[in-house]
Amino acid sequence: MNGIDIQAIFFDECEESLQAAEAGLDACKAGTQDGETINAIFRAVHSIKGGAGAFGYEALASYTHVFENLLGDVREGTVPVTSDLVDMLLLALDSLRDHVESVRGGTPAPDDAAIKARLAEAHENVGKDGGAAAAEAAPAASAPEPAAASGSSDTDDLDALLDDLLGSDPAPAAAQAPVEEAAEDEGEVEGDEWALYVCPQAGAMDNGSEPLLWLRELVELGGTCVKCDESILPQIDEMDPKEGYLAWTFAMPGSVERDKVADIFDFVGEQCLVLYGEEALNPPARERKVAAPEAKAPPAVAPAPAAAPASAAAKTEAAAAPSPTAAAPASQSIRIDLGKLDQLIDGVGELVIAQAMLAQRLTNEGLAHFEELAMLEGLVRDIQESAMAFRAQPISSVFSRVPRLLRELASSTGKHVKLVVAGETTELDKTVIERLSEPLTHLIRNAVDHGIESAEDRQAVGKDPEGTLTLSAEQKAGRIVIRIGDDGGGINREKVLAKAIEKGIVDPEVHNLSDEEIDNLIFAPGFSTAAQVSSISGRGVGMDVVRQNVKELGGRITIESRPGQGTDFVLALPLTLAISDGMIVQVGDQSLVVPLTHVVESLSPAESEIKGMGRNIRMLNVRGQFLPIVPLRQLTGGPCADASAEASMENGVLVVVETERCGQAALLVDAIIDQRQFVIKSLDTHYRSVDGVAGATILGNGRVALIVDVDRLVLDMTSRRQAPAEAA
Amino acid sequence: MKPTRILTVDDSASMRALLLHALTTQGFEVEQAEDGQQAFEWLATNEVDVVITDINMPRLDGFGLIEQLRDTARHADRPILVLTTESSDEKKRRARDAGATGWIVKPFDAEKLATAVRRVAH
């Protein structure tokens, strides 16, 4: 694992932390302000800070440090959780998100001066008001006072508890009464060497410490033990293995710095007396330990009687505190490199194909009804579903960003919008999730900007002045359906049509557009109805891009608008991008795949249902609606002369497809062969991009079949013949 | 000689990865846990030479883990290092009082880790 991998994990983690912090702050805002919620927010920011320091992202580390300071105050209860505070923390979180983005993208750090100053100010105010009280509270924390009043973190409670358990602090070495004479002059230190005196006290071996290791380290540094003082070593029956009876004097080479030696004894602190230079040669006299029970007993088992009730209470509290969370099941997960996962899924795709090929071969041999074959098919399907589930992620990762978006929109438009979310646990392919956030953001901006009316307008028609945005996701018939609904005024169709005519998107002569067709005009390139172009939406580039994005994901977007009541945008997305359902059709000697998402119905037309328009255009009458017929033979490079087209029309099958931009059309094929799942292989990577072809797949018989890009194909055909609407 | 075996306890995957990388390059054997609770449960049936733990973690934090381990006879003298972002005397005192054998101040490098581990590994 190299640095880049670890950084990638860090960024994933930042994302998780940001989401956790945001969820926590949202919960605070909604009134849940318990310790665990606050702690989770603190942990999230703390974790980003840790990584930032480790990777050397200074701006991020410095910002998180300031952020964490204030959160620390909040956690300790010295800063009350007010609505204003939560708002500020949310802003600070937004800025933190920008910081993370800038580090990830390698762009300059965002300007955080203002928010940083606010955070620092809030933190410093605590120091002024509560600092003195906190300082006093700290040593007294062993008393069961409300810990929240103390200025230190919850670990102080633990400190207090441990202080109680350990009894009093071990007496500082300097306080020991001089009884014996100072060490004799044996410990000579020569040349540029300097003297070091080491005397572990009782407690130096607590916490798993091992003084012998320090002495070894001194020797490794080049030190020489010149004297061991065992003068106070008691008789063996009086000896306490945890007590410090020995003291050593070392001669350290002049080249070894004092700091380096001090480092060795950093961990042990006061439990080991360390003296340097002159002082080391004249250590304080040591007292022989008397075998009196109160002095000798290990402090841990003899807490001061007065402190016992408090310690017991503290212990109960400490034990009770983590229990609600400790009961939660451990999340058992491992991280897998996405590349490896895709390799597996690719392999599963091949397995699906191989299985289909085997089935085909056996069928040809007349062996189709073997039980084992059905078993294999079932297993392959199970494996495929499991493999797909690896890439699945809950859509909540996208939905959770919406509150921030709404806050931004509220401040820029003045429209406060309630958010209702449903089905956020619905799972979608990771790639789909990643590419969904942009169109979703645009749709939400659009809903707030154009859909939801101003508070005054809403009140005028008797609506709640606060608009509501509804986000929902559900799995429906092999698709994920995402609905973005607002309770605004609905699409003003007159205005849309007038605008479309003005922009030249619709011919002014056309008057028979259905409501649905008018609604769909907002997806036309260059369309914008905002009377005033705002900074948020309404630049007229949005909605067609949204539709394009959704289409690239293999999905479709539809509008359901009710005048005066609101508009719903409905996105239907595939569960995965790698495997799709398709209809295999025969055209000449070629097999083609039509993605099932486009297919509406298929029919064998009677001659009377086909009307000719001009030389090359034929229309199919489907229950009174005329649809252009697109012979797929054109795509396969076959002749599309009248004679052959005519001929194939007789025996052919028409597949009615729904397209994004041209409504419905009928694809003319020779026959429908099969309908099943196929693995999409990109032509771009194996060959080159071909107009009208979305990709390729391998069929059960081992042959390669092209996947038809229905939208593109129909668009090409119809635009070549000029607007078919005129003909209708 | 058998390599020193270390359990790292950190809820941050990137920190675990950094520790793993740094410690294995220094020749240590590394086991990992995602929080104090998982570490404690794992240690109930497993043995390591040194535990390195973060302080702030969900479920059971670093100090809580140390407290529980110190209450367990088998781990009472287990060398435990805590990862801390601050090197103030106040923080050191707190770590020591909580039962930590020593600490590693973040950000750390492989050498700093190795020195700290060798200083406490029995």
Image (cartoon, coloured by chain):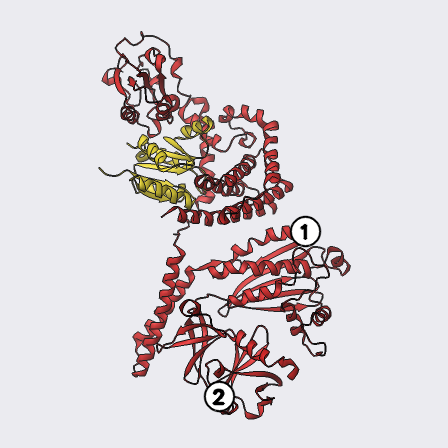
Chain colours: A red, B yellow
In the rendered view, would you say A27 is above or below B116? below
The residue most toward the left is B1
Q: Disc 1: which chain?
A: A
* Mark 1 element type: helix
Number of marks in the image? 2
Residue A369 placement: quadrant = bottom left
Mark linked to residue A173: none
Query: Above or below — where is A73 with respect to A603?
Result: above
The picture places residue A670, in percent across and down from the top left corner, at 46, 86
Q: Residue at x 55, y 92 (%)?
A: A607
Q: Are marks 1 and 2 on the same chain?
A: yes
Residue at the spot 29% in from the left edge and 24% down from the top edge: A218
> Depth check: A211 or A519 in front?
A519
Q: Chain of mark 2?
A: A
Q: Secondary structure at mark 2?
A: loop
Residue A342 x, y percent position in the rendering: 39, 61
Marks 1 & 2, CB-CB < 8 Å contact: no
Q: Quadrant of the C terminus of chain A?
A: bottom right
Q: Distance of mark 1 from mark 2, alpha carbons?
A: 57 Å
Q: Is residue A23 above or below residue A213?
A: below
Can you give x and y, in whole percent of width and height, for residue A392 in the image?
45, 60
Is residue A470 visible to us here?
no
Q: Amino acid at mark 1?
A: Ser
Farthest residue to the right: give it: A460
The residue lying at 48 percent from left, 42 percent from top is A48
Does A20 appear above or below A142? below
Query: In percent of the image, x 33 and y 77: which residue is there?
Result: A359
Q: Which residue is mark 2?
A: A652
Say whether residue A643 is left or right of residue A525. Answer: left
Image quadrant where residue A344 sits: bottom left
B71 or A493: nearer the viewer: A493
Report which residue position mark 1 lands on: A412
